[in-house]
């Protein structure tokens, strides 16, 4: 086997769970082969560079082998090597994600309870606007 469709290779290398998901991502221009946008029928061969985006993470891999079947993960990892720049960028993104504060955690209080709402309305009874008189 000298070449293989990119959607089948991405599926066999376990970047996507199904071939249809791989085809969808390729159709959304999230996969490039040798710097050019790919179509699902694009043929890849060993030595090609594939750039793909999985969520917020962008990965750049070099095709090392071809397989038409989806095997176990250790075998699938032999089909490619990730570039050092891609590994560093992925680790940096993971570190930023780990250190970033979850936006939902910044909310100290949720919706006011009925008691809170009555308390708020009580303070607004003698005012007709939000401005200070």
Image (cartoon, rainbow, N blue to C red):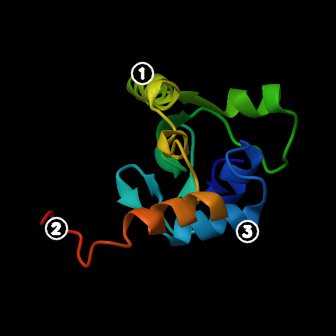
Label 3, label 1: how many angstroms apart (C-alpha)? 29 Å
Dot 3, crowdedness within 10 Å: few (<14), some or many (≥20)? some
User: Callout 1: helix, strand or loop?
Assistant: helix
Camera-nearest residue between 82 and 3 = 82
Dot 2, crowdedness within 10 Å: few (<14), some or many (≥20)? few
At horizontal 32% and vertical 72% (from top left) the residue drawn is 126
At horizontal 47% and vertical 33% (from top left) the residue drawn is 101
Please identify the quarter of the rendering in which residue 79 is found: top right
Label 2, label 3: how many angstroms apart (C-alpha)? 58 Å
Query: Vertically, is 119 above or below 75?
Result: below
Q: Which residue is mark 1?
A: 88
Residue 3 percent across, percent down from the top left: 63, 52
User: In the rendered image, is residue 69 in sight?
Assistant: yes
Left or right placement of residue 73 versus residue 32 in this view: right
Please identify the quarter of the rendering in which residue 129 is found: bottom left
User: Callout 3: helix, strand or loop?
Assistant: helix
Left or right placement of residue 105 versus residue 4 in this view: left
Q: Which residue is mark 3?
A: 20
Residue 102 percent across, percent down from the top left: 52, 39
Q: Nearer the viewer, mark 2 or mark 3?
A: 2
Dot 1, crowdedness within 10 Å: few (<14), some or many (≥20)? few
At horizontal 53% and vertical 72% (from top left) the residue drawn is 27
User: Callout 2: helix, strand or loop?
Assistant: loop
Q: Which residue extends farthest bottom?
A: 128
Q: Nearer the viewer, mark 3 or mark 1?
A: 1
Residue 6 percent across, percent down from the top left: 61, 57
At horizontal 65% and vertical 47% (from top left) the residue drawn is 2
Q: Which residue is mark 2?
A: 131
Camera-nearest residue between 79 and 114 = 114
Q: Earlier in the sequence, mark 3 or mark 1?
A: 3
Q: Which residue extends farthest left?
A: 133
């Amino acid at each position: 086997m000298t070449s293989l469709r990119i959607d089948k290779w991405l599926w066999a290398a376990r970047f996507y769970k199904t071939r249809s998901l791989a085809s969808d991502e390729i159709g959304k221009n999230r996969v490039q082969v040798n710097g050019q946008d790919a179509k699902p029928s694009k043929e890849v061969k060993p030595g090609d560079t594939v750039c793909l985006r999985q969520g917020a993470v962008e990965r750049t891999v070099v095709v090392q082998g071809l397989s038409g079947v989806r095997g176990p993960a250790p075998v699938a990892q032999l089909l490619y090597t990730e570039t050092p720049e891609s590994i560093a960028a992925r680790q940096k993104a993971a570190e930023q994600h780990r250190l970033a504060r979850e936006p939902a955690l910044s909310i100290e209080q949720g919706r006011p309870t009925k008691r809170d709402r009555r308390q708020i309305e009580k303070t607004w009874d003698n005012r007709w606007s939000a401005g200070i008189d």
